[in-house]
Image (spheres, grey):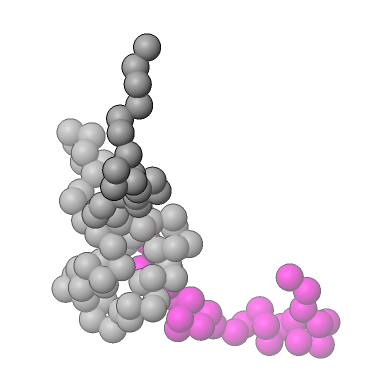
Amino acid sequence: MQVAARTYRAWKKRLAALRTIEDARITDTLRSQKVPDAKGRPPPEIIYGRRKMTQWLRRNGFPEASKHTVDRLMREEGMNGLIRGRKTRTTIPGKDAAAPATC
C-alpha cells in the first residue's frame, strides 16, 4: 500500500475503522466455528446459512450484526451453510417413450 510522504505520520497514528474492528471480531467467531471439538466433530452451527448465522451471532454477543455484513464475511471465509432440497432435473423423459432395449 502506498502512502504519500506528507501524510505518513498521520496515517500511522490513525485508529482502525470501526467496521474493520467489528469485521475482525465476527470473522474470528466464524473461524472458531470451523475448529472441531474433542471428539473431532465441528459444532452444529457450522452448517448455518446467512440467515441462521446472523441470528446466532445476534444472540451470542453481536446484537448489531447485519445480514449483509454476515453474508459478506461468510463469503470471504468460504462458508455457505448446508444446502438442502431437490437436485436439478436435467432430463425429462417423453410421455410415450419406451424403455431402451437391453442386449
Residue 25: x, y in percent? 37, 69
| Residue at 78% over, 74% down | 2
| Residue at 29% over, 43% down | 96
For this orientation, the residue located farthest to the top is 103
Frontmost residue, 63 versus 76: 76
Q: Is 102 placed above or below 56 here? A: above
| Residue at 42% over, 67% down | 73
Q: State which quadrant residue 19 falls in.
A: bottom left
Horizontal placement of 11 versus 67: left or right?
Answer: right
Chief SS of the magenta region: helix
Q: Is 98 placed above or below 20 here? A: above
| Residue 25 magenta-highlighted | yes
Residue 57 visible from this viewpoint: no
| Residue 10 magenta-highlighted | yes
- Magenta residues, start to end: 1-28
For this orientation, the residue located farthest to the front is 96
Residue 17: x, y in percent? 51, 83
| Quarter that holds the C terminus | top left
Frontmost residue, 26 versus 45: 45
Q: Is 54 placed above or below 85 here? A: below
Residue 1 visible from this viewpoint: yes
Q: State which quadrant residue 66 falls in.
A: bottom left
Q: How many marks?
A: 0
